[in-house]
Amino acid sequence: MIHKTISLADQIFERLESDILTGVYPIGSLLTELSLSEDLGVSRTPIREAIRRLEQEHLVESSSKGMIVLSITPNDAMVIYDIRIHVEGLAARACAENITDEQLAELKELLDLQEFYIKKGDSEKVKNADSQFHRMIYQFAGSPVYYDTLAPLHNKTQKFRKASVSKSGKAEVSYNEHYEIYRAIASRDPEKAEQTMKYHVEQARARLAELTDLT
Amino acid sequence: MIHKTISLADQIFERLESDILTGVYPIGSLLTELSLSEDLGVSRTPIREAIRRLEQEHLVESSSKGMIVLSITPNDAMVIYDIRIHVEGLAARACAENITDEQLAELKELLDLQEFYIKKGDSEKVKNADSQFHRMIYQFAGSPVYYDTLAPLHNKTQKFRKASVSKSGKAEVSYNEHYEIYRAIASRDPEKAEQTMKYHVEQARARLAELTDLT
DNA sequence: TCATGAGTAATTGTATGCAATTATACCTGT
DNA sequence: ACAGGTATAATTGCATACAATTACTCATGA
């Protein structure tokens, strides 16, 4: 078996990004290169490379005493949804125009997976499949620009979405919306793909607004 | 005088980003850490940190022989404009809702500067003021999300815009559009701010499409 | 008691060294 | 002459060492 080696720097970036977005490191926490390198058991070099990238995404901010965890405010989250409503709409439209049959099959597979885990009640896996569904659309939209723009935005909303999706029976609603998006893309209907995606993200935005008392 | 020190890694990132976007390093060129460190007279450490960030923005891609310069295709540029049309519209709207009087004065000053350089015929400075005008709107929109999303997109279009704006008398047209955007923001008219900004970016997209025979 | 200053600790920025992987060139055998 | 393999070179990944800056502590003097 071929073992593709992923650099420590990359692994650490993904881990730190995830830990920041899910609140393992709360907003305002102080991270130092030394403490991270001790915790993770690596030298400062890969830590630094990961931190520079987090800095670029404004997930941390340098201070004289170390790196301060920023994450995002509820207002930022609403702005992200406003942007996603438009840009994911464009991405879904582009997807309907450009997707190949193989890619379409992959998308369907992910949808089935989401259904499977909903029935099984594994909300962690559901959330995962949900995220991957969106990311896949970014990837199949025909330009890396979509992915580069949307993936960081999508990541940042995960933290907030967590509370929203996992409780109550909203998972089915989300799944049904995904299914409609899939159908529109599968029938190569750009107009409908954009419409259904926009509606889906608008609903997600509304679910969040409900929780945080923001408009 | 206080001398704020900017790290070598940051300086190198900005320099490489600019050099890639302006074609100093053509698409497909091979950059190695060693050759860059020799050319720039620094060690590999800050070079690596800069490269990791370029990689994150998909401006370079790692290969076994070094880093390959990617930049963007004309199609990517059109996608970027499609996204900017929507998101900068949102940003201008948010700006009209949130901008302070001081910020408004800053924006006006930049506009005047742009006018000044147009009359002087310094197209390099005009282009600079133009970019800064947009960036300022991202900053005054009330959430760092706007800046983080739009700044990389805007940067990437610079390379293509270069040919478009510098030739012919399009600079005045662009200035007039900026002025309309400013007026809408100054009168705190979100609807009109969004409208005028969308129109402005659409025009920029059209100017590029003309040059590259894309739609 | 409080301000001040020196010394110390903590932290980042940069350079360098070493290991591991991958490409290249050359050489040898058929 | 060409295929295959070995040695060498090039390149990255990671760790460590050192320098410089900044924060902190504590003692001392007014």
Image: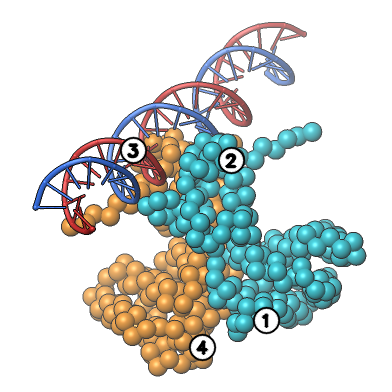
Chain colours: A cyan, B orange, C red, D blue
Badge count:
4
Residue at screen point 55% across, 76% down: A75
Label 4 sits on a secondary structure element that is helix
Chain under callout 2: A
Indicate the amino acid at tag 4: Gln
Residue annotated with mark 3: B41
Q: Dot 3: few (<14), some (14–19), or many (≥20) neighbours within 10 Å?
A: few
Badge 3 and badge 2 in a common chain: no
Spatial CA distance of label 3 from label 2 is: 32 Å
Q: Please state which of residues A114 and A91 is positioned toward the viewer in this rendering.
A: A114
Q: Residue at x 62, y 45 (%)?
A: A11
Q: Nearer the viewer, mark 2 or mark 4?
A: 2
Q: Are marks 1 and 2 in contact (CB under 8 Å)?
A: no
What residue does disc 1 label?
A: A210
Give above or below for B137 relative to A15. below
The alpha-carbon separation of the residues under discs 2 and 4 comes to: 50 Å
D25 lies above or below B211: above
Determine which quarter of the picture holds residue B74. Answer: bottom right
Sequence-earlier tag: 4 or 3: 3
The label shown at residue B195 is: 4
Looking at the picture, which amino acid does disc 2 mark?
Leu
- Contact between marks 4 and 1 (CB within 8 A): the answer is no
Q: Nearer the viewer, mark 3 or mark 2?
A: 2
Kind of residue indicated by mark 1: Glu
Specify the quadrant of the image occupied by residue A208: bottom right
Q: Nearer the viewer, mark 4 or mark 1?
A: 1
Q: Is residue A93 left or right of residue A111?
A: left
Q: Is residue A175 visible?
A: yes
Q: CA distance from mark 3 to mark 1?
A: 55 Å
**Pointers 3 and 2 in contact (C-beta within 8 Å):** no
Q: Is residue A148 visible?
A: no
